[in-house]
Image (tube, rainbow, N blue to C red):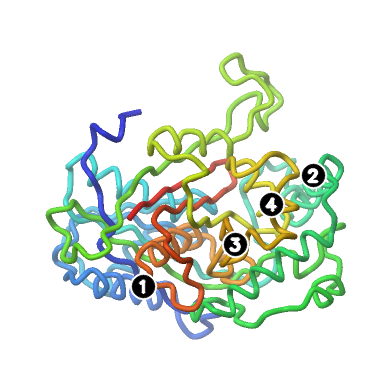
Amino acid sequence: MKPMNQMKDVAVAGIGLVRWKRYVDQEIYDFGSEAILNALKDAGMEWKEIQAAFCGSVYQGTGSGHQVIKEIGMTGIPIVNVENACSSGASAFRLAYQSVAAEIYDIVLAVGFEKMPRGPIPSTAFRPYELKMGFNFQPANYANETVRYMTETGATVEDFSRVTVKNRKNGALNPNAFFQTPVTFEEVMNSRVVATPLRLLHCCPTCDGAAAIILCSNNKLKSKTNRITVAASVLASGVYGGENPVKSVKFPPPFDIVEFSAKQAYEISGYGPEDMNVVQAYDTMAPSELWNLEKLGFCQRGEVLKLLKDGELDIDGKLPVNTDGGLMSRGHPLGATAAAQICEIVLQLRGEAGPRQVAGARIGLAHARGAGPNSAVTILKR
């Protein structure tokens, strides 16, 4: 892995978001292209300046990025479609970042988009025998992990409900979130059981959406005000001896992919968890926010429960987490999710997050996890 001090600095030139909702009468090329146009406007750039595009999606079919970009203009640039489960947007971002850092291009687009069917995610990331056994029903998979987490840490269903309440409160401050209304603790606790111990309001909603990010070399940046640069962009996959039954000599158990990716990001950036002012933690289910924060190194196993109860994970707390509502409120269009997490960190570091702004934010981390397994960690700095 090439040290950051040997790579060219890469800046975030612009970001573009759309309202996340059910686009009943529109397709991915409609709202996906809108996100790109918003990013171009934010960057003060024209489409003809983009030299390459990396497009993250999961279930959108062949050449989905081409279909989205066709709405803006086909200019002969390389368009790469990236499918990497729920980390697709971060994976597209990493490829865009590497292209600029390696001085292959000066201005590159990363975009994520998805139009989701209603109901549980129809995951195909399993072998046929696993599908027959129901492994692709994600609430059940998370429920099993949740039970283990409760046994090991003493976490309760009440703790998970507090995560939902916090994130829905934050989402109410985000005009692009799918859910823009807070919920009470009682509403969460009284919602129907989906997979014991998880209730409906412990599960993130699927929806449609898109997020775009333009990356560039410093000399191409149109505005130097609040310049945001990439400190680290890491993507890790599983190993034998981790989530697989075959043991590994190089990675002896216990091995955790989130811990592994976070360690790489900290080493590359030169920062640690204590330096982060704002965090986007992957919360596809409410309890996953808690154990992911621990795996990212922000506290020891089980200690996050006290941070949550004491309000330290709130916007005005010591470790603001999922300030835009996270997946629980913003929603989860698979290919766009990780890109939107990065966009929120950019807004926070620029001081442009409005009523959900974290005071004095200068360094932020975004984390996404996807089937494979894979784990993406992005660190940005002002």
Q: Nearer the viewer, mark 2 or mark 3?
A: 3
The numbered mark, 4 or 3, whose residue comes first in the sequence reads: 4
Between 106 and 245, which is closer to the camera in this rendering?
A: 106
Q: Position of residue 233 (x, y in %)?
A: 39, 44
Q: Amino acid at mark 1?
A: Ala
Mark 4, residue position: 290
Tell whether label 3 touches label 2 (CB within 8 Å): no
- Image quarter where the C terminus lies is bottom left
User: Cα distance, mark 4 to mark 1?
Assistant: 30 Å
Q: Check disc 2 and report the residue beneath it.
A: 149
Q: Residues within 10 Å of mark 3 (few under 14, many from 20)?
A: some
Q: Which residue is mark 3?
A: 317
Percent across and percent down for residue 51 are 18, 56
The reply, left or right, for residue 15 in relation to residue 131 is left
Q: Earlier in the sequence, mark 2 or mark 4?
A: 2
**How far apart in space, not on screen, are marks 1 and 3 (Cα)?**
31 Å
Outermost residue on the top side: it is: 249
Question: Which residue is found at the position 12% from the left and 54% from the top?
Answer: 219
Q: CB atoms at circles 2 and 4 under 8 Å apart? A: yes
